[in-house]
Image (cartoon, helix red, strand yellow):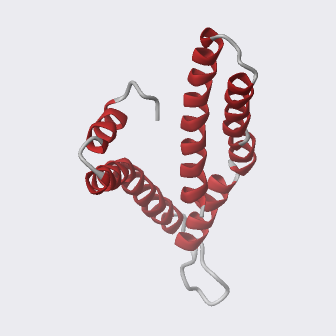
């Protein structure tokens, strides 16, 4: 979400021609950004099911349950990142507050440049943690 990257520049360029093109560009970039994670998570769940199935686990009646067990273990692995996600999720608002404080206190522009970079990092961090949260849901 930093202003030096191509997708942000494309959306900004689309903003110059109107609201509709801005929305279309934003939705398009959003769809591009989610395609690879969907493929990776789908592959991971399928692989976890297959590996669990290969374990040969069965229930008391002899029905194979290894695939379900493998999927459950993979889901618990994703959920184990919840503490990390919650911790990283806090950085964005802190960086936003720093920028607002600098702006309201009439600090020099050089300080605002630094807080703008922190804000960009905070936005990226927020986007990353949202990806973790959606993936684990």
Foreground of the two, 67 or 8? 8
Task: Relative to 10, say whether 130 is above or below.
Answer: below
Across and down, in percent, residue 80 comes to: 70, 51
Task: Please state if 131 lies on the left or on the right of 21 as rendered.
Answer: right
**Residue lying at 75% horizontally and 27% vertically, measured from the top left:** 101
Q: Quadrant of the C terminus?
A: bottom right
| Residue 87 vertical placement versus 131 (above, below) | above
Q: Nearer the viewer, residue 77 or 18?
A: 18
Picture coordinates of residue 37 (x, y %)? 42, 51
In front of the other: 54 or 113: 113
Residue 94: percent from the left, percent from the top?
74, 34
Q: How many marks?
A: 0
Residue depicted at x 50% and y 60%? 48
Residue sitting at x 34%, y 53%: 35
Furthest residue in direction bottom, as rendered: 61
Q: Name the quadrant containing residue 57.
A: bottom right
Say which residue appears at 68% left-offset and 48% top-offset. Answer: 81
Q: Quadrant of residue 42?
A: bottom left
Side of 27 where 97 appears, left or right? right
Measured along the vertical axis of the image, is residue 78 above or below residue 120?
below
The picture places residue 7, in percent across and down from the top left corner, at 33, 37
């Amino acid at each position: 979400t930093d202003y030096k990257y191509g997708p942000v520049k494309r959306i900004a360029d689309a903003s110059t021609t109107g609201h509709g093109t801005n929305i279309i560009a934003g939705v398009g970039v959003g769809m591009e950004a989610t395609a690879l994670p969907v493929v990776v998570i789908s592959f991971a769940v399928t692989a976890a099911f297959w590996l669990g199935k290969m374990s040969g686990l069965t229930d008391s009646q002899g029905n194979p349950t290894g695939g379900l067990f493998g999927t459950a273990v993979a889901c618990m692995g994703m959920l184990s990142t919840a503490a990390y996600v919650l911790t990283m999720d806090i950085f964005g608002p802190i960086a936003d507050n720093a920028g607002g404080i600098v702006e309201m206190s009439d600090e020099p522009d050089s300080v605002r440049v630094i807080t703008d970079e922190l804000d960009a990092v905070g936005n990226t961090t927020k986007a990353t943690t949202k990806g973790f949260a959606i993936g684990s849901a």
